[in-house]
Image (spheres, rainbow, N blue to C red):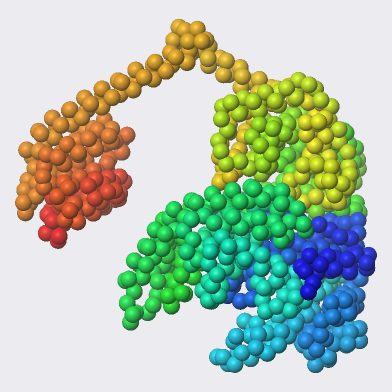
Amino acid sequence: MKTSKEIRQEFISFFEERDHRFVRSSPVVPNDDPTLLFTNAGMNQFKDVFLNTGKREYVRAVNSQKCIRASGKHNDLEDVGRDNYHHTFFEMLGNWSFGDYFKKDAITWAWELFTQYWHLPKSRLWATVFEGSAAEGLEPDHEAIELWKTCTDIQHNQILLCSKKDNFWEMGDVGPCGPCSEIHVDLGEGTCPKSGKGGHVCGVNIDGCWRFVELWNLVFIQFNRLPNGQLERLPACHVDTGMGLERICRVLQSVDSNYSTDLFVPILEKIQEVTGIRDDTDEKKVAYRVIADHLRALSFAIADGAIPSNDGRGHVLRRMLRRATRFGRVLGMHQPFIYQLVPAIVAVMGDAFPEIKTQAAHVARVIHSEEESFGQTLDQGLEIFEQMLSGITAGSARIFSGSDAFKLYDTYGFPIDLTRLMCEEKGLTVDEPEFEKCMDQQRLQARNAAKFRMNLGEWIVLKEGKASSFTGYNSLSAETSVIRYSKNDKNQLLLVLEQTPFYAESGGQVADRGTLIQNGQKWNVLDVYKEGDSIVHVCEGDTIPDQSAIQAVVSPENRSAITRNHTATHLLHAALKEVVGQHVNQAGSVVHPEYLRFDFTHFDKLSDDEITRIEQIVNRNIRANISLQSYETQYTKAIQNGVTALFSEKYADRVRVIQIGAVSSELCGGCHVHATGDIGSFRIQVESAIASGVRRIIALTGHTAEKLTREESRAIQDAKRLLNVSHDSLAPAIEKLLEEKRHLEKALRESQRETAGNDANRMASQAITMDGIRVLVHQLKVDSLEALKDLGDSLRETLQPGIILLAGEVNQKPTLLCVISQDLINKKYHAGDIVNQVAALADGKGGGKPHMAQAGIKAPEKLPQALLQAPELIRAYIQSR
């Protein structure tokens, strides 16, 4: 039986022998593409080629790409575990042609690999071809049909014409697109549990059919979709193919499921070992599969730099981990355990993807932390869910309230798909419109935080050529020419230059600032960004450029500040590894002229001693004035030599290395000082947590670090002068002042309580009796909310049984406070019910605990009338009990 490692390598070698360049998988977290949460197809890293905004030094490529489909249009999350072939994480084997070979070679090689190389039975293979679309004015793909008939020996009746839905691929609403041919395999009778049930007839492209499974999609990119919906033929045609490794392993290993391949079996066995549960019932089998699948997606996403959080891709990861944790309950696991499975992922996939080995400890710690935090509320949420079910009677519509689903989400962190899953197990459906209504009411920010750059105008071409070359490593000025220009939605001028010294924002380093000058006209450069192989300069100014020479000048002060902070970032990274541990890895950075921001993987707050040691190490290396060396080499050679790479970044085969003596060696395309002494000095300003397992340092260098030191020194001198103490006596003097302040506050508090007690005795005489309950409604002047609560507590002790409603102005805001004695609380009275009824009369609302609740007032002018009506409202409340 072929192993998955052999199948992956055989696919790559097959196309390498046919002059394809092997291209490493890009990260599953596409930090350079704001339109994607996760890499979801092998073509993602070649998108610029298909969009004609970039190019490669090769025209044929092959790779195995890490992919996640768990959100948006491509979302397999809720199918996982229910069938044999859907996953959130999968590997996509693919081969590409960029304007080189086309349909004939793609079809011929696919058939050759399947039937001659891997010896799949020809009788079990089916090919689908685009049947055309009258609405689009597209004819059937006659070329592909004929090629299948003449270049392969597939049975002609197993070539099927299928609709645009299944056999026409589009990148988006606009852009490259074209027909495709899919190769399906017939797994044989008895492999589809739906066969003969509910009218289901097994067949190719039949929704939900388990017998006929797509293996490989051959996409022929030959059109461009225009904004008006029309199609135009591309000048160069491309091939983009994708085949799921998990599915082809299932077929070649002759097993009954993707989960029975060697990609999953070791992980499933580890789950059984850790949980101590070995059970083949359907419920347990689904739990095993969901946990194994979600673990793979989580591990690779975290290894590539993502962190579970409440928005964006982090929210998707948190959803997956919480689903996996809930399925752990099915296996009797009430303590964190998923993190213990990470070594099984490393064993299966560490050779193909070394980053999962390098980041294994970090991945396990992040997962463990998330399991712990969610586990504390999961069991309580499940108990609440069961209580919510008790209100649904057997004869009802079997609808689970959308507001209850929202409560589970908002209070206990249950994603809606988790609630939906639990409801399905009980034969219920969730009222999702009501849930969405609740979400809309709570949602304070837009769902999609992705940042897009809009170019509203058409590009005006002044000179042929698409690529820009960066010359700014060695010079801050260049005489160049404009390739093309446009305007954006802010009416700013966009210029693409043939050569430019301006660094475009990337790798955490912000863009350069400066000026462009042509024929006496001057434009200020506000931003610079990459668009494929082009470097776009965002400029301030209305004058349109022409074809004459243009002078590009980078601000030397701005660039100098950036380079100081960028090199300091490398020194900081090295110092963190030395002081905190080798597990520290960069998880993001911003290199700005005024500061540097460095995010790193670590779970504990840095101590004052650790921060001091890190600063000392960085400043020692600055004083050593170490010369920097930059050189280019092959990526694989750099990694073998121990050069640090960030796995969230996408690197070309040839990379640039920044070497700082024996201190640091990193892959980096950014700008740096010539020697560390140019940095001047280094100070850490802030150290904080930003996510589970990720911390952030904000630091200063050069004149900004000196400014911070001067400000701190001035503050210390002022404190010494005001307290009239020496430097050594300053801290004890401040501690003494703070202690005196605490004593005074305590004495004031006790005095306020005594006053409140006296006031309570005086005010109690004004209470009236309603059905044996002492009721007091009173408006008074009060210094603080604490004083109002103290008075309420005193009255609560004095008036028993009693209901007290107090109105006071706190921080210039009218506030209502209701307190209820304990004997009434035992009878299910609740202060929040009363305070909200009265507050509503003055457009206010609030809440609190049964014994004490408060409310804010939005219409102060209505408060006097509300207080007049309060006694009758309280009377009605008492009588309703």
Horizontal relation, residue 758 to residue 413: left or right: left
Report the front residue among 769 and 21: 21
Viewport quadrant of the N terminus: bottom right
Can you give x and y, in whole percent of width and height, for residue 376 in the image?
44, 53
Report the front residue among 429 and 498: 429
Horizontal relation, residue 11 to residue 528: left or right: right
Residue 144 seen = yes
Report the front residue among 542 and 23: 23
Q: Quadrant of residue 199?
A: bottom right
Can you give x and y, in whole percent of width and height, for residue 162 in the image?
74, 85
Viewport quadrant of the C terminus: bottom left
Can you give x and y, in whole percent of width and height, for residue 809 in the image?
26, 36
Q: Quadrant of residue 863?
A: top left
- Residue at the spot 66% in from the left edge and 40% down from the top edge: 584
Residue 175 seen = no
Q: Does residue 583 lie above or below 652 as drawn? A: above
- Residue at the spot 77% in from the left edge and 42% down from the top edge: 644
Q: Does residue 767 lie above or below 735 as drawn? A: below
- Residue at the spot 16% in from the left edge and 56% down from the top edge: 827
Can you give x and y, in whole percent of width and height, for residue 42 in the image?
76, 64
Q: Does residue 139 lie above or below 377 as drawn? A: below
Q: Quadrant of residue 861?
A: top left
Horizontal relation, residue 845 to residue 41: left or right: left
Report the front residue among 403 and 341: 341
Q: Does residue 576 lie above or below 409 as drawn? A: above
- Residue at the spot 70% in from the left edge and 78% down from the top edge: 255
Count of residue discs: 0
